[in-house]
Amino acid sequence: MNIKTAEFIVSNSDYRKCPQDGKPEYAFIGRSNVGKSSLINMLTNRKGLALTSARPGKTMLINHFLINGEWYLVDLPGYGYARRGKESREQLRKLIDSYVLHRETMTSLFVLVDSRHEPQKIDMEFIEWLGENGVPFAVVFTKADKQGSGKLGLQVEAYKQKLLETWEELPPIFVTSSETKKGRDELLDYIEEINKSI
């Protein structure tokens, strides 16, 4: 897929106020500091489209970006940022849950995980929750350039094995790097395939 246009449309704290034009939405989510904004900028080839921050937990709203005038890329808040107050965390959880469970135009959710870490409890619980609720999702490993290919392969394999403990089959899996653009074509082609089948 060739991305010709990518424009920010709107930020919301309520999924019911999101765009109502029926275009398919592909949402990106992950733990704070997983490299979500960098990945979105890399996919769209727009350096400052999604704001990156050295401070984790910056995205607090549902952000819609219109791609090629055809579909939305949705930037969701990160989950599990410990330094937020309990009330703030609960508010974010409700925002994420309501979007993921009730947004009918959300076609697929991309769950971002840092390829440098062992499977994290919080990620596994979130993925379990998606499965229990029948939410279509894919797993996207980020920061693939931060380690050698041997170590990267072992980490991805460990994650797959962990998933297979509770899943009969694996979701689509992508390995990406915002620095080297690894995985960009695969991810965009996957979105394009889904768009064609809708």
Image: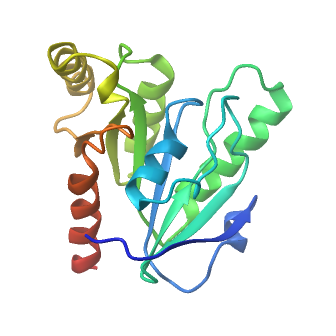
Can you give x and y, in whole percent of width and height, for residue 104 in the image? Answer: 50, 71
Residue 108 visible at all: no
Residue 152 visible at all: yes
Quadrant assignment for the N terminus? bottom left
Q: Is residue 168 above or below residue 25?
A: above
Q: Is residue 95 above or below residue 25?
A: above
Can you give x and y, in whole percent of width and height, for residue 72 in the image? Answer: 49, 70
Q: Out of 3 and 110, give the one closest to the viewer.
A: 3
Q: Out of 186 and 128, give the one closest to the viewer.
A: 186
Can you give x and y, in whole percent of width and height, for residue 137 in the image? Answer: 35, 50
Q: Is residue 120 above or below residue 25?
A: above
At x 42%, y 61%, the residue is: 44
Q: Out of 32 and 147, give the one closest to the viewer.
A: 147
At x 76%, y 58%, the residue is: 13
At x 28%, y 51%, the residue is: 184
At x 22%, y 16%, the residue is: 148
Quadrant assignment for the C terminus? bottom left
Q: Is residue 9 above or below residue 143?
A: below
Can you give x and y, in whole percent of width and height, for residue 98 in the image? Answer: 64, 55
Viewed as shown, does residue 75 lie left or right of 85? left
Viewed as shown, does residue 1 lie left or right of 57? left
Q: Out of 122 and 63, give the one closest to the viewer.
A: 63
